[in-house]
Amino acid sequence: MKVLFAAAEAHPFIKTGGLADVIGALPKALKAAGVDVRVILPKYKGIAEKYSSQMEHVAVLEVPIGWRNQYCGIERIVFEGVPVYFIDNEYYFGRDGIYGYMDDGERFAFYNRAVLECLPAINFQPDVLHCHDWHAAVIPLLLQAHYRHNPFYSEMRTVFTIHNLLYQGVFPYSVLGELLGLGDSYFPGVEYYGNVNYMKGGIVYSDHVTTVSPTYADEIRTPYYGYGLDGLLTSRSDALSGIVNGIDTKSYNPASDPSIFTRYRSNLVKKAENKLGLQQELGLPVAPYIPMVAMVTRLVDSKGLDLLTRVLDELLYYDDIQFVLLGTGDEVYERWFREAQWRYPTKLSSQILFNDALSRKIYAASDLFLMPSKFEPCGISQLLALRYGSIPVVRETGGLNDTVHAYNEETGEGNGFTFKDYNAHDMMHTLRRAVSFYHKPEHWKKVAKNAFTGDYSWNVSAQQYIDIYNKISDKVTE
């Protein structure tokens, strides 16, 4: 089985969010299961020199974009056993950042077309093109429209994975002909209120659609979570699967992580030493028996921050806890948490920055990890928290619902604490309930053991993807 991953970002080369973690880890799990898997990315200016200096030049070709051809270089590096290719074009990708440019529709139209054009040049004929999010979503459409007649491409099949339906890649109607080189007969497959919707194209033209948790696969078929595509997704229910993300358990391992203060396996005493180290580093009172609640998050509405800002003053005023927040995002939230730290300097540390090493220290140090998300397709942070024995307090949505199970004091089952309604006081009540169990060692040891012993690797999920690859490839010979 030969599979090519097409995505806009991948750890450790370039990252803005969870998509990069998936593309960095899942191919390694597939390779370990016997799949010949490769990855193809844009070659961004922001890729670190230590990686770009290792790239070998593979080929140069021209890529058709509408009525013109554009230069395309192909570079290659083998990282941890997985070949990774880079699409090189300074005009499109030699810029700061990844997204947010006025010509993003053109930049990623070029990338999608380049992925297909470069396959003969890199001498790789995949059985499956696995395309991720809107940035790679028109590959299945372009394959059908421009390449299916060519014997080299005729038996390739496509999987499209939705990581976050909120971001769909919607561009003006003119993109259809001027950039994708398509006539009006293809417009219904991408039409979205008179515009061209890249993600819709991926859903319509791929052989199978996946998303990153079973609950999210159900949620996006409802108007509230579907963002205008719920009807289309419902029509494709037979070809829609939800597969929970894993994490790189080798990199995220408290027994060997060089970033944390004290390494440990499932020893809560050793874990507590990390709390003392972080309290000292952040200038909080060094107090081992005060429960530490943490968030490592983007500071945006969808992460439930409006719930937290409504009740955090009450929690910090009345409750004997410490709260540590790490993240960047909307200015209004950045300012709010800075001001809150000024009000509660001995109880709150607001770290308004991005720092991977600090995030690992927080996972290792914290007792409870809060994720009150409005929606969460899968979520990586709760899996990392569980791996480090920080007990999640989450809202029952998306992948949070699939990976965090409410602790039952009668049976001793469950690895976290959950609430259902998007309500600030429900969240506060659940957090206070979690804190009450922290002070009951006989229960806390049970919930911590459940967290530590969970399997958060990609092994099970990788096999589910392989099953889908085999299923759609079998159709070729039917």
Image (cartoon, rainbow, N blue to C red):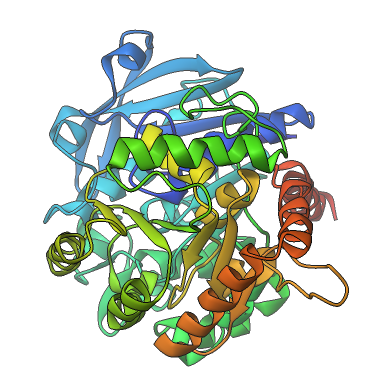
Tell me the quarter of the image containing the C terminus: bottom right
Residue extending farthest right: 411
Q: Hey, which quadrant is residue 416 in on the image?
A: bottom right
From the viewer's perspective, is residue 394 above or below residue 12? below
From the viewer's perspective, is residue 258 above or below residue 252? above
Q: State the image coordinates of residue 305 (x, y, percent, origin top left).
A: 32, 73
Q: Is residue 268 left or right of residue 347?
A: right
Q: Is residue 355 at least partly visible in the picture? A: no
Q: State the image coordinates of residue 32 (x, y, percent, origin top left).
A: 75, 28
How many labels, in total?
0
Q: Is residue 292 left or right of residue 166?
A: right
Q: Is residue 252 at least partly visible in the picture? A: yes
Q: Nearer the viewer, residue 377 or 200?
A: 377
From the viewer's perspective, is residue 257 above or below residue 272? above
Residue at the image position 52 percent from the left and 18 percent from the top? 79
Tell me the quarter of the image containing the N terminus: top right
